[in-house]
Amino acid sequence: MEKYDGEPRRTAEGRAHSSTRERLLREVEAHPEATTSQLVEATGLHENTVRGHLERLRSDGHIRRERDSALGRGRPAWRWRTVPPAQLGAYAGLAATLASALGEVSAEPSVPARRAGQSWGRQLIEERGGAADAGDTRDVIIEIMREQGFAPDDGGDTVRLRACPLLAAASRNAQVVCAVHEGMIDGIARANGSDLESTLVPFALDGACALHLRASA
């Protein structure tokens, strides 16, 4: 991956990265699939410092982690890789246009929007190599939402979505865009073999969206 040489990136809340966090992000970009120990060695930083920054970068949607292949005894290490910046940002204008058009041609635009989201969710599971353990569906949903730019904070009963990759479109067409996102979450759960139920409440927590995930009754 080409090394990023611009200004420091930002957290989900819009604050510029510290020099240490930006340095670590650039190390991940320069060394795709590096382990935590390799990043500690490359930066010379304390392991706890590296771990803390990696988790914040993951929470803000900049990087993702994957388990290394199991070799010998012990739990495989995490390997880190970057998430393409603003994965959906290039399509934000198109999304806004499609959401508006759907609202004009359908009396209940949320219905086809939700179906489209379910298809999207199934596709995201397929792109990850198929279903994981159904018991891990909650973690899978949160991980995918990180990758898609929602910057989720898992608070237990409620997941706080601190960012929206289609915020401008959602602000103007919440009924359609949020229905797509609800469908996406449902599609992920079903494709992963789970009956986990979800409720998405737009802009419920000081401007952030509230996602409630619960086992089916």
Image (cartoon, helix red, strand yellow):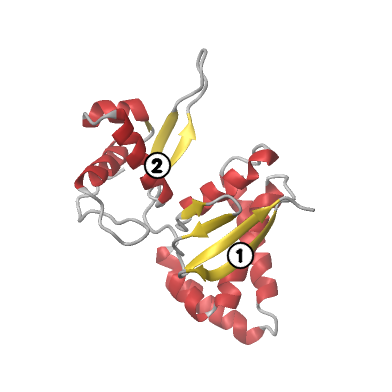
Residue 77 visible in the displayed image: yes
**Is the residue marked by circle 2 packed among few (<14), some (14-19), or many (20+) residues within 10 Å?**
some
Three-letter amino acid code at the position of disc 2: Glu
Q: Is residue 194 left or right of residue 103?
A: right
Q: Are marks 1 and 2 in contact (CB under 8 Å)?
A: no
- Secondary structure at numbered mark 1: strand
Question: Residue 128 placed where, x, y %?
Answer: 56, 43
Residue 53: which numbered mark, if any? none
Residue 200: which numbered mark, if any? 1
- Secondary structure at numbered mark 2: helix
How many numbered badges does the structure rendering display?
A: 2
Question: Residue 90 placed where, x, y %?
Answer: 40, 65
Question: Residue 159 placed where, x, y %?
Answer: 55, 55
Q: Is residue 109 left or right of residue 149?
A: right
The answer for how far apart the CA atoms under marks 1 and 2 are is 24 Å
Looking at the image, residue 132 lies above or below residue 4: above
Label 2 sits on residue:
55
Looking at the image, residue 15 lies above or below residue 79: below
Task: Say which residue appears at 53% left-offset and 70% top-offset.
Answer: 204
Label located before the other in sequence (1 or 2):
2
Residue 11 in which image quadrant:
bottom left
In what quadrant of the picture does the N terminus appear?
top left
Depth order, front residue of 190/156: 156
Question: Residue 169 placed where, x, y %?
Answer: 48, 75
Three-letter amino acid code at the position of disc 1: Leu
Residue 51 in which image quadrant:
top left
Q: Is residue 150 left or right of residue 9?
A: right
In the image as oriented, which residue stretches furthest toward the right?
Answer: 217
